[in-house]
Image (cartoon, grey):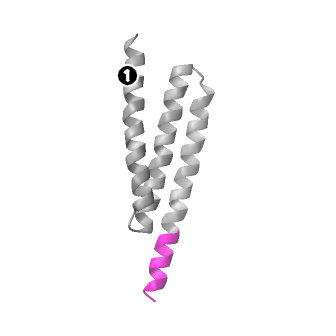
Amino acid sequence: MSIETVLLGASAFFITVGFLATFARFLKGPSLPDRVVALDLITTIGVAIIAIYAVLTREAVMIDVALIIGIISFLGTIAFAYYIQRSASDEHR
């Protein structure tokens, strides 16, 4: 068992724990902004999982997949932030 395998296994464990905690916040979140941030973090964790898979299988194309998912996630977060800001400004009118 190499050190790389041990470190990747430990990384996968901690990423899984982080995913479960974030998913609980996504389900329980008291407000829409909390859920949006949790969803963004879930996609970031998904990118990390894909990156670990790419390292384990030595498939470089998976890094491209992770980058594309990260970009789409970022654009989605920007759209949600715009929506929340827009609805907040409509309430003050």
- Residue at the image position 48 percent from the left and 71 percent from the top: 84
Query: Which residue type does callout 1 highlight?
Result: Leu
Residue in front for this viewpoint, 41 or 93: 41
Residue 87 painted magenta: yes
Q: Position of residue 55 (x, y in %)?
A: 51, 23
Q: Dot 1: within a 10 Å radius of its alpha carbon, few (fewer than 14), some, or many (20 or more) residues?
A: few
Q: Is residue 35 above or below residue 40?
A: below
Q: Position of residue 31 (x, y in %)?
A: 41, 68
| Quadrant of image for the N terminus | top left
Q: Position of residue 8 (x, y in %)?
A: 42, 24
Q: Which residue is mark 1?
A: 7
**Relative to residue 53, is residue 19 drawn left or right?**
left
- Residue at the image position 39 percent from the left and 56 percent from the top: 25
**Relative to residue 45, is residue 79 drawn left or right?**
right
Q: Is residue 81 above or below residue 70?
A: below
Residue 85 painted magenta: yes
Q: Is residue 25 above or below residue 86?
A: above
The local secondary structure at tag 1 comes to helix
Residue in front for this viewpoint, 37 or 31: 31
The stretch in magenta equals: 83-93
Q: Position of residue 91 (x, y in %)?
A: 45, 85
- Residue at the image position 60 percent from the left and 42 percent from the top: 68
Secondary structure character of the magenta stretch overall: helix
Number of numbered markers: 1
- Residue at the image position 42 percent from the left and 44 percent from the top: 19
Specify the farthest residue to the bottom.
93
Residue in front for this viewpoint, 31 or 80: 31
